[in-house]
Image: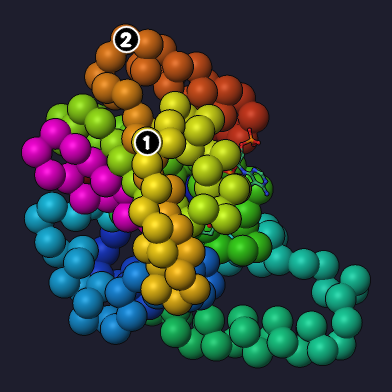
Amino acid sequence: MQKAAYSIRPIRDEDIPQVTEIDREAFPGEWLFRPYTSYKQEIHNSLAHYIVACIERGAEWNLGLEDSRKTSWFRRLFNHAMLAEREQSNLRTKEYIIGFAGLWTMLNEAHIIAIAVRNSYRRMGIGEGLLISVIEVANQLNANVITLEVRASNEIAQTLYKKYGFRVVGRRPRYYSDNGEDAILMSTDNITSAPFQAHFQRLKEAHSQKWGIFATQLA
Ligand SMILES: CC(C)(COP(=O)(O)OP(=O)(O)OC[C@H]1O[C@@H](n2cnc3c(N)ncnc32)[C@H](O)[C@@H]1OP(=O)(O)O)[C@@H](O)C(=O)NCCC(=O)NCCS
């Protein structure tokens, strides 16, 4: 049987320091829940559902990090310091978190709060794996529709969402307080409908053909 490259599972309290790192890297102007206590509150909120993508500790040395022979002495020093710091903060956990996603559900609507992947693990299908899992979680929670807000300038995320059937349904002017940027509102059609499900299954299949399987344990 093919071994999964990474797994996606519900977040746990011990993941918070690593998720905070990813949050700060991915959303520099708008840390989602800055202090540890806010994260803790958020993930224990019964309306919120957070998942993480993780690999076995140690595998990060083989994946994603730059080849030190090709980098400058400054970059090597920086990488070394960064890795030492990361090791310090993460030594107690066996898993290395490479991405996370969160959604809120209210009645039949699921709202994506964030999807983020560590810089050095982008363009490897992990963000898409997280979005697939978020859609599956929304399905399990009996949501009919998934909505989100995304920065007008964030074309990468909008491309990913459009691939999965999200359409632009509105705009909130000056929504982001750090730079006054507009938010684009996006929404799916009914995710339980046959056309949405057929498209979703095709994309899931194509994703696993391209990137291999990932293990999921969502509930
Ligand atoms: C958005 C994000 C989660 C994508 O994660 P990723 O793991 O790099 O994405 P994947 O490798 O799974 O790519 C999936 C799809 O996303 C789109 N995409 C990803 N990177 C892209 C890029 N650099 N340019 C254009 N499209 C891109 C493509 O549609 C891609 O599908 P394809 O492989 O068929 O072209 C990641 O860039 C990120 O963490 N960004 C910062 C946080 C953020 O902006 N989150 C979204 C707002 S909530």
Say left or right for 36 vs 126: left
Other residues around mark 2 within 10 Å, as few (<14) / some (14–19) / many (≥20): few
In this view, the residue in front, 57 or 185, is 185
Residue sitting at x 27%, y 50%: 103
Q: Which residues make up the magenta segment?
A: 103-115
In this view, the residue in front, 129 or 198, is 198
| Secondary structure category for the residue under label 1 | strand
Say if residue 56 shows up in the picture. no
In this view, the residue in front, 97 or 109, is 109
User: Which residue in the rendered view is the most extreme toward the top?
Assistant: 194
Residue 20 percent location from the top left of the image? 40, 74
Residue under pointer 2: 194
Residue sitting at x 88%, y 82%: 72
Q: How is the image coloured?
A: rainbow
Predominant secondary structure, magenta span: strand
Residue sitting at x 57%, y 55%: 153
Say left or right for 36 vs 182: left
Residue 37 percent location from the top left of the image? 21, 81
Residue sitting at x 65%, y 89%: 81
Determine the CA span between mark 2 and mark 1: 21 Å
Amino acid type shown at disc 1: Val
Residue under pointer 1: 169
Q: Is residue 179 magenta?
A: no
